[in-house]
Amino acid sequence: MTKEKSIKVIITGVTGMVGEGVLLECLQNPAIGHVLAVGRRRYSITHPKLNQLIVPDMFDLNEVKDSLSGYDACFFCAGISSLGLKEPEYTRITYDLTLSFAQTLVKRNPQMTFIYVSGAHTDSTEQGRSMWARVKGRTENALAALPFKKVYNFRPGLMKATQGQKNIPGVYKFFSWLYPVVKTLSPNSASTLSDVGKAMINSVIQGYPKSTMEVSDINLQAKF
């Protein structure tokens, strides 16, 4: 894909912190020509590039599947915390929902680049003691087996919100003062959400040699 071509992208999870940050980067980035935000709730802004597709049940895309054709990329930012959840419940939202959505997309967009927001310390072996890390690893591995043009698993660490974001969890607001400290002491443990979005866009345009992108890869890819 060349930089001259305007990219059409689907984003999930825009009412969450990561999805909103990626969306805001896409809306201001000249490489992106059109964004379709897919989710259960409407995002609160309007923009010439932005269309929204409200889907009450993200497991049931039959009535909207034709609206998901003709896209170059999907930035899958939807997800939940594992805090307080047992493995079956966390698996349903993290693994089952992600794969169901991806399988619908790949049938209609085989030349799509699919980018999944995973997490630092995800367990690719699927055998570790951490439940969330195993489930995320299983999700990454299953996505890699789908016949997309390319799949990238993004594993961000601590992230700094973009100015103007509205969907910021209270726990983030409490710990946000740590970002400059972590970024100074361990630069490859933290990213801005703007850089996460830039890295996604650049991965669609020019590719990246690794399919699993740790924080250091994300920060490097955001510079190009």
Image (cartoon, rainbow, N blue to C red):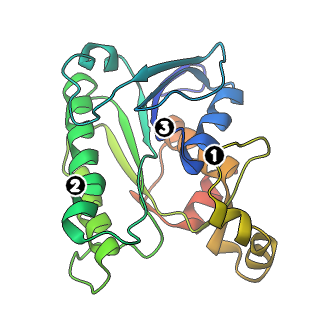
Image marks 3 and 2: residues in contact by CB distance under 8 Å: no
Q: Amino acid at mark 1?
A: Asn
Q: Amino acid at mark 3?
A: Val
Secondary structure of residue under mark 1: loop
Separation of marks 3 and 2 at Cα, in angstroms: 28 Å
Crowding at mark 2 (Cα within 10 Å: few <14, some 14-19, many 20+): few
Residue 98, given in percent of the width and then of the height, sits at 28, 46
Crowding at mark 1 (Cα within 10 Å: few <14, some 14-19, many 20+): some
Residue 153, given in percent of the width and then of the height, sits at 40, 56
Q: Nearer the viewer, residue 182 or 187?
A: 182
Give the mark nearer the N terminus: 2 vs 1. 2
Q: Report the residue marked by disc 3.
A: 204
Give the mark nearer the N terminus: 3 vs 1. 1
Q: Residue at x 54, y 40 (%)?
A: 15
Q: Report the residue marked by disc 2.
A: 92
Residue 10, given in percent of the width and then of the height, sits at 44, 29
Q: Amino acid at mark 2?
A: Arg
Secondary structure of residue under mark 3: helix
Separation of marks 3 and 1 at Cα, in angstroms: 26 Å
Q: Report the residue marked by disc 1.
A: 167
Name which quarter of the figure residue 179 lies in. Answer: bottom right
Q: Residue at x 40, y 23 (%)?
A: 54
Separation of marks 2 and 1 at Cα, in angstroms: 23 Å
Q: Nearer the viewer, residue 113 or 101?
A: 101
Secondary structure of residue under mark 2: helix
Q: Residue at x 41, y 57 (%)?
A: 80
Vertical relation: 41 (above or below) 215? above
Total number of numbered discs in the rendering: 3
**Which callout, 3 or 1, points to the residue nearer the camera?**
1
